[in-house]
Image (tube, rainbow, N blue to C red):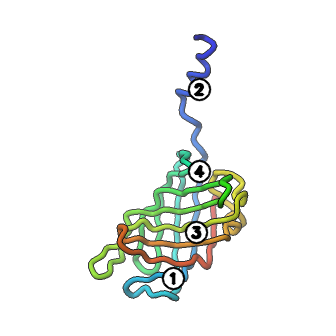
Amino acid sequence: MRRFAPLLMALALPAAPADAQECRLDFTVEVTQGAGDIRPGRILSGQATFRTSGQDFRGEAGITVHLATGDMTIDTGIRGDIWAIVTTSGNPVADLLAVHARNVEGFTVAGLRYAGPMTITLYAHPGSLPGTDVPTAQAAWDAMDLSRRFALHAQGYDRVAGDVTGLGVACN
């Protein structure tokens, strides 16, 4: 039993938390699927600021969810609470980097409230992300260039979607 004690203690102790970090994203979206007065072809400006909590957990297919706080805004008055940054690295299909906001306010069409989630999802060829940490350098976010999408969902009924056409990143 004594020889297993260090192993049992290691399993009982939580993993060391990752370092918390703060980032600001400035982005533009060209709408491809619209709703209400947000029509295809329209360019929307947005901003996201977040602070990771240092807590993250692994999921299936190499996904890592980094818990975060902050907010994402787009256009005038549409905003949501950022709760997670998701990374996938080492997957044979594609690397992924996504910013997720919930509790979205400020956009309703014909009585349908677009309450989220609101997401920015960036994809790249496998190996583009060097690891599971949220990247802090502009070049790492720029490398996520296979597909760059934005979506604002209306509780599963409809969505506003588009291509992320510009993305500036500043992290400390």
- The residue pinned by badge 2 equals 10
Q: Amino acid at mark 2?
A: Ala
Which type of secondary structure does the marked residue at label 3 adopt? Answer: strand
Residue assigned mark 3: 25
Q: Measure how far apart labels 3 and 2 are at the Cα level.
A: 38 Å
Residue 45 x/y as whole percent:
52, 80
Image quadrant where residue 88 sits: bottom right
* Vertical position of residue 2 compared to residue 49: above or below: above
Q: Which mark is residue 61?
A: 4
As drawn, 8 above or below 139: above
**Distance (Cα) linking label 1 and label 2:** 50 Å
Sequence-wise, the earlier of marks 1 and 3 is 3
The residue under the point 42% across, 67% down is: 80
Residue matched to label 1: 32
Front: mark 1 or 3: 1
Between circles 3 and 4, the one closer to the viewer is 4
Q: Residues within 10 Å of mark 1 (few under 14, many from 20)?
A: some
Q: Does 78 sit left or right of 16 as displayed?
A: left
Q: Say what secondary structure mark 2 lies in.
A: helix
Label 3 and label 4: CA atoms lie apart by 26 Å
**1 vs 2, front mark:** 1
Q: What residue is at 50 percent from the left and 54 percent from the top?
A: 68
The CA distance from mark 2 to mark 4 is 25 Å
Counting residues from the start of the chain, the first of labels 1 and 4 encountered is: 1
